[in-house]
Image (cartoon, helix red, strand yellow):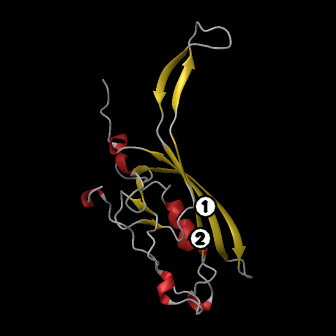
Amino acid sequence: MSADDLPTLPTRPTYPLASRHSPQDADRVLKKLVIANLDKSNEGLWAQYNPKEIQVDKSASWSPSATSKGDHPELTFTTSNARTLQLELFFDTFETVGPGGAPFDVHKQYVEPLQKMMLVMDEAGDEDRRRPPRVMILWGDDLPKFVGVVESVSTKYTMFMPGGRPVRATCSVKLIETSRESFMRKPKRP
């Protein structure tokens, strides 16, 4: 992938860590996974921790022939489906220091920006903007390029401060691959 193919990445967040961590711990040498918004520069999400696995699925649709009989029907290919990508992201703000010395809210810092990638960009705008943004998954140099849309985000909050502020969450994210042409306005047929 050339530098021209890369989107403008969102600003990488830096949050002050609790005093027992050194500043070098905040930015390790490891490459971090990024979900970059292709429709709005500098928006997206940096993974706090890289996923332990990524699942990519590709399927084709087949249908039995109308004349098929028995246990081994004749099949007819109907279509190839888009690839899907699923990953799980873990976020933890318990050891960060936010305003007033309390940890940052994991929902506001990580989950909300992820969920924003499923919102319609401009409900009253041009037809090509009345949809959620396209995104690109980037992680190092070896992961194949995946461009698509976020289909779902399922969030499980697993740790809270005494006042109820969530400080730990796991998000299961599912994306569907698409191309730029999928969003081009199609001419009306007479």
Q: Which residue is mark 1?
A: 171
Q: Position of residue 45 (x, y in %)?
A: 46, 66
Query: Which of marks 1 and 2 precedes in the sequence?
Result: 2
Residue at x 56%, y 20% (from the top left corner): 63
- Label 1 crowd (10 A; few <14 / some 14-19 / many >=20): many
Q: Which residue is mark 2?
A: 91
* Label of residue 141 in the image: none
Please give the name of the residue rendered at 47% of the width and 86% of the height, measured from the top-left corner: 24
Tell me how far mark 2 sits from mark 1, CA to CA: 8 Å
Q: Amino acid at mark 2?
A: Phe
* Residue 94 image-quadrant placement: bottom right
In the rendered view, tell whether residue 169 sits above or below residue 23: above
Q: Nearer the viewer, residue 187 or 113?
A: 113
Horizontal placement of 67 versus 156: left or right? left
Q: Is residue 103 left or right of residue 186?
A: right
Residue at 26% across, 61% down: 3
Amino acid type assigned to the residue bearing label 1 in the image: Cys
Q: Are marks 2 and 1 in contact (CB under 8 Å)?
A: yes
Residue 185 against residue 33 in the figure, above or below: above
Quick check: 134 above or below 8?
Answer: above
